[in-house]
Image (tube, rainbow, N blue to C red):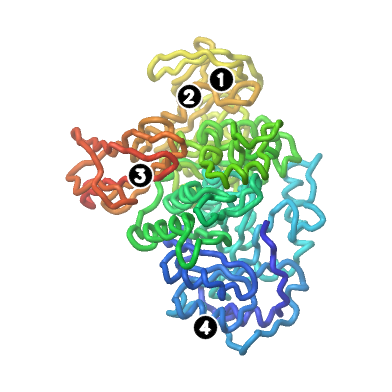
Amino acid sequence: MYAAVKTAISLGLAMALLGWGQNRLPSGGSFRDRTFEFYHEFYGPEAFLNPEASANFRNRMANGVSLQPPLNSGLVDFVTSRGINLMVDLPIQSRADLTPFVFNTRQKAVEDLAGTGVIARLMWNVMPEWDQSGGNWVPDGRPRYRGLTKTQAYGRFLEYYYSAYPSLFSFLEQPVAARKYWMTAITDHPSNTFYSYEMGADVCLLERGIDELGDISTGIPFVRGAGRQYDRQWGIDVATYRTSNGMATKFDSRENLLGGWSPSYLKRHYYIAYMAGAHVLRNQATGYYGSGANLDPFGRMNQEFADFALNRHTDVGRPVVTTALLLDHHSGFDTKHWYFNQADAVWYQDIPYTDGDRMINSFLRLAYANHWLHGQTPGAPFNDSTGKPDAKGFQAYLAGGGDPRPYEPMSVTRYGHSLDVLTDRASLEALRQYKVIVLLGDAPIDGRLRGVLTAWVQEGGTLVLTAPQTVAFDEKFLGARVENTRRTGTSSRWLLDGSSYREAPFWFSPVTVTTATVFGTAEGAQPLLTSNAVGKGQVILSAGHYLQGATGDQILTIGTLLFDWLAGQNTVATVTGAPVEYIVNEAPGRVIVTVVNNSGSEWAGTVVVPVVGDVRAVREYTADVDARWSRVRSRVTVMGQVPAYDVRVYAVEVGPADR
């Protein structure tokens, strides 16, 4: 939906405009930096003249602006006079984009803009929605991958961009030390976030919101994990456009929503992105005002969020992410969503699932329940005879004052936002940031990765893998010998408490235990789950193939117990009550738990945080009020209440040495 601006600009002038050749290393460009920039996009040439642009910064609703060329003196003055950050939306798509360009007014260079005290950050958005299925980047339709292996599909995917847009790579391949701006990509599909960094982007934003793309909750593990793997910054690009009603967020004079997404839905996206650690949040072009200078409901929500993130709570620490899900770098995996992205297939739905892909899908269904409903309108009164929304009927429903929120499904998180996705190209340094690594799918284990995983386990990590994933590992590492045959199981037993379960039929390989300990069995006494000590860490082996049933549509009950148990071993805070979406952050002297209620009923539950020492305060940060709490020995229990379709942020504040 992004209309890429094909501006003619010479390579030499582009370098000058954006500070090329100044030999300044962009500061704050690492994943580890805790910075946050909130950009509002204003679309079209000289969009900074839109009165809403001035009003938004006067109302302190963002600290950055996203604008298209021309890069004239008016644009420069707009940015410098306000001391805000600038994202230049200038896609480099072809050689035609590098033809001569002249300023509309005077020849005022912009190189002084970057890295000065006037503006801290200049981002060049060279790849806006670059991996879309059609449009400006693939005007003749994207490459097809039917009949290819995933490795071949990956090669065809990259070759298309290298062949079609060589000028893009003349920019991306420049060393970071040669410039003082950040090259930015806005990516549509989660697995492609890794490829944008691989191509050379400094910052990757994953677009969320619009129906055709996946949900934010499963998207964050991919883009945040990719940022961590490549040590780059990441963010979320929020689209307020909704395909189901054919509009971006807009209100009438009575403040009835006419189309797009509700402010509540977008607010929850903002808080999820910010609390999950995003360095950048970009709001696509949308109106913020009703009559006169009065903010509409969307504008008021933006102002309230900006006050929270840019003023009152600028330091919310870092999200607690304990577990990495290790995937094949060539997976091409996209999470299921909307009505037309439900196929059991990867690479733009061209390559059918393997059993390993089914494991990825099954695990995500467990960890992010309901994520596959994103973009749908189940049970809506404006659905047609096929059960899909009628755009005109949807608009009429909204214009009549209908509540859109029940028809904006979002997920719940079984493990909070404690998961990242990495690929088989991750370094040991990247792996060291996690306590648990789960091999999902068909990640190939070559000699390099085997050595990295072995070193990581010896240092204290817990590696989880299943029988089909053990080929590269020896018996000493596994603590068991895995036979190259398979049997059918229908029962399991969790030996840690003796509980037994009837399972859907599943495949498992016979295992002969050597040094490992058995803590789960199948069919009575057959080893199903084992743990082997390796250095300071452990290797957990599932004899059950991919920890799922033979049909590949769900994780085994004993597999769910395993993942629940591992999550419990590494928790910083526990959230109890009806299923909900939540994020746990740690900051000096504080544990902060964000509870996102995506249901139509008030959520009432508890947030439990272990504390040794004094509790200075327990606060709810969105309203900055005291929260109800109690303490029994080292357990602080916060009594939480979150209205329907809303967010609350609970903080347990202690002395710096008391956690």
2 vs 3, front mark: 3
Distance between the alpha carbons at the discs numbered 3 and 4: 41 Å
Residue 254 at x, y percent in the picture: 50, 53
Res 593 label: 3
Res 112 label: 4
User: Marks 1 and 3: CB-CB under 8 Å?
Assistant: no
Residue 528 at x, y percent in the picture: 52, 20
Res 530 label: 2
> Residue sitting at 62 percent across and 19 percent down?
507
Visible residue check, residue 77: yes
Residue 520 at x, y percent in the picture: 47, 19
User: Marks 4 and 2: CB-CB under 8 Å?
Assistant: no
Q: In this view, does 61 lie to the left or right of 182?
A: left
Name the residue type under label 2: Thr
N-terminal of the two: label 2 or label 3?
2
**Of the pair 626 and 26, the residue shown nearer to us:** 626
Pointer 2: residues within 10 angstroms few (<14), some, or many (20+)?
A: many
User: Quick one: SS at disc 4?
Assistant: loop
User: Quick one: SS at disc 1?
Assistant: strand
N-terminal of the two: label 2 or label 1?
1
**Of the pair 36 and 162, the residue shown nearer to us:** 36
Distance between the alpha carbons at the discs numbered 2 and 3: 33 Å
